[in-house]
Image (cartoon, rainbow, N blue to C red):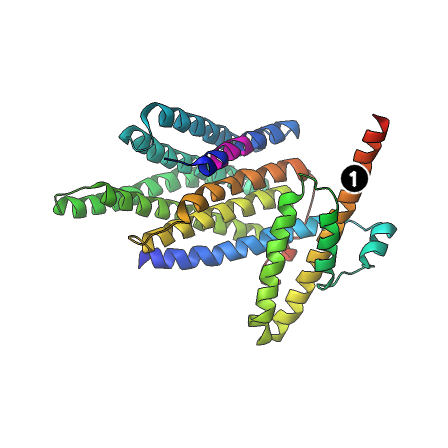
Amino acid sequence: MPGPFQYCVWFLCTFLEVSVVVCSIAKGSFRRYLSLNVYMVAACFVNLARFKILLTYGYLSPEYGYFYYYSDLLLTIGLYCALMGLYSRVFEEMGAGKYVRLGAVLLLLGTAGFSFAIVQQSSSRLLGQFVMDSRAMGHLVLEASQNLYFVGLVLTYVLWGAMLKLRETRTRLIQLVLALGLYFSVFAASYAFRNLSTGMRNDIWPYFIPISGCLLPLAWAYAFWRIPEEARIAPSRLAVVPR
Amino acid sequence: MMAGVIFVFSAAALLQFFISYCRSLIAASSKQSLSAEVKDVTGIQRFASGDDFKRVMQLLQLCPERPEDRNSVQAIGAYFRLLNFLRSTIAKFVPSMQDWTESERGHCAYFAAVALERRISFSRDMLAEQMDA
């Protein structure tokens, strides 16, 4: 059962998600970054629905478990759509919107196929044992989440590389992409670490993941509220390796 | 094996994104010039050095917090500690990295001075509001 700390972080995260949308509307950027805002609205509703199911069925119920992981999967797909929105913002001046949309559909299908392959492979392995206990199921979910976040990280990394190459100067867009990169890398690394340390006692995990979940809405709310759309920055200053 | 590869790549990407994100926060403040008053208080004239950071942070903690810049100040504090770590380890063997870390530490100090300037004007506004009330 979540403790007071987890509840606080949960509500903080929901509050920050609402803040992103409010800041974006207040600064007149809602339609410009529509996919990001739609994702934040969806994440907010999912948080509320999870809370309702938690209260109704309890933390250890299968209803809560299924809803948690299915909604997490849908939200990750939503985050890919948000990422595609950022791709189309970066490439809009090149008139490459059509190719980005095509790429997005292919990517979504590819990711779905990749995840299906993992699940099928693991399921046959598990069925071979004739036992599909909750521990094995948990491991399967960990592996799938780790891969999905990693694909997201690679895509964000490619976008960041393209932005440096194209000398993108829009500060807000840069901060949105970097925050997304941070979010994906934190989650991919922590899921991979959890996967590596299966069986070991891990006291940090219940605290680390919820706090990490607040990173993205916090950074996006900051970018919408503090950075004007017209702000510009020299991208060469941001590269870790000086250019 | 797969999880190990993903962990190493993600940790490296995390470090790179974190550095770039902090630099984007710093770059936004580097265009701002400091008032004569803040220059006097901090001792920073045009360029800040890494050694100024600790002092400026102490001054910053004396002022009432602005909710808007709390997280960015914390992020830059973490970035500064990372730079210190790099300076005392890898940079000892790579001279070019020594210059880079020192220049970045200076930028962090300048960022903190700009945050101090904002907090001072925020405190003044609060005081003025209280006086009016």
Image quadrant containing the C terminus of chain A: bottom right
Residue A28 falls left or right of residue A2: right
Disc tally is 1
Residue A135 falls left or right of residue B83: left
Residue positioned most to the right: B36
Q: Can you give x and y, in whole percent of width and height, for residue A209 in the image?
A: 44, 44
Asked if residue A171 can be seen in this view, the reply is no
- Which of the pair A213/A238 is nearer the observer? A213
Q: Residue at x 65, y 66 (%)?
A: B100
Magenta stretch in the rendered image: A9-16
Residue that carries the numbered disc 1 in the rendered image: B123
* Res B104 quadrant in image: bottom right
Decide: is A57 above or below A241: above
Residue A105 falls left or right of residue B103: left
* Residue A11 on the magenta segment: yes
Asked if residue A124 can be seen in this view, the reply is yes
Q: Can you give x and y, in whole percent of width and height, for residue A105 in the image?
A: 39, 37
